[in-house]
Amino acid sequence: MGILAGAAGLAFAAVLAVSATAKADDAKLEQLKAQGFARLAIANEPPYTAVAADGKVSGAAPDVAREVFKRLGVEDVVASISEYGAMIPGLQAGRFDVVTAGLFMKPERCAAVAYSEPVLCDAEAMLVKKGNPKGFKSYEDVAKDPSARIGAPGGGTEEKLALNAGVPRDRVIVVPDGQSGLKMVQDGRIDAYSLPVLSINDLVQKANDPNLEVIAPVEGAPVYCDGAAFNKKDTALRDAFDVELAKMKESGEFAKIIEPYGFSAAAAISTTREKQCAAQ
């Protein structure tokens, strides 16, 4: 926890440096305060975003945005469901104030919009016995332990990452489905089972087994993140958003919002917009 808090603290200090710029050019924020809401573009893709039968918008991304805007003095958010391909053009045309929809950062998207710092990330995770008895933090750790066996879907990213880290083929066990992987960890037939964070957390939540533990994010493995996406003309608003987001990461409020949905706050704190936008 100390390492994560330190990383969040550094991010907090960094975004505070831009807060003066945000205050110097806050016309957009003042407009949103006056109208009382920010217009969000979302997909209907739980757990990133969701729209209930009564029209209420929820999901991890809108929930974070709602809280950040509230802290900025914008009382509410209203959302429109959009196809992913139409989100950035709609933002550029002024139909939305921000996109909060699991729109993962890529260099070409970073060139088109002003992203906030990372919000929702999908990273690799490992399911292990409580206490992480073999001390795994990375696929390399599995490779170094000659007795360790790791389970992963056949032909999937996790299998490739384990093999590329030096885990011998005979210690990478192909697992047909999530329930089988969980049972193999419970029975001690494998020492770890690897899937993306969301998938592992979903398995653990349904299993409700206190003897299991999730290691996330796996060190050295790719982390893919979205952020709140703003029009390039609204960088001051983005900067103000980042200041409040950093405060929430620092205080633990961010984790309280996203982790019930299965996302890892640690994954979002482990990386930055700059790293995500530079990744190919």
Image (cartoon, helix red, strand yellow):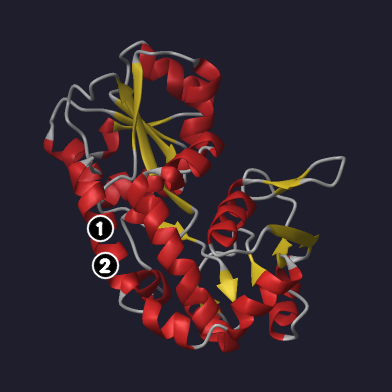
In the image, residue 273 lies at what x, y percent?
40, 70
**Residue visible at 67% across and 44% down in the picture:** 46
Asked which quadrant contains residue 148, the reply is top left
Q: Is residue 48 left or right of residue 256?
A: right
Dot 2: what SS? Answer: helix
Dot 1: what SS? Answer: helix
- The residue carrying mark 2 is 13
Residue 84 vs residue 144, the one in the foreground: 84
- The quarter of the rendered structure image containing the C terminus is bottom left
In the image, residue 241 lies at what x, y percent?
50, 68
Q: Is residue 59 left or right of residue 25?
A: right
- Identify which amino acid the numbered label 1 is placed on: Gly
| Cα distance in 3D space between marks 1 and 2 | 6 Å
**Residue visible at 75% across and 71% down in the picture:** 35
Q: Is residue 144 above or below residue 235?
A: above
- The residue carrying mark 1 is 9
Residue 243 vs residue 43, the one in the foreground: 243
- Mark 2 neighbour class, 10 Å CA radius: few under 14, some 14 to 19, many 20 or more: few
**Residue visible at 30% across and 19% down in the picture:** 129
In the image, residue 41 lies at what x, y percent?
72, 65
Residue 77 vs residue 149, the one in the foreground: 77
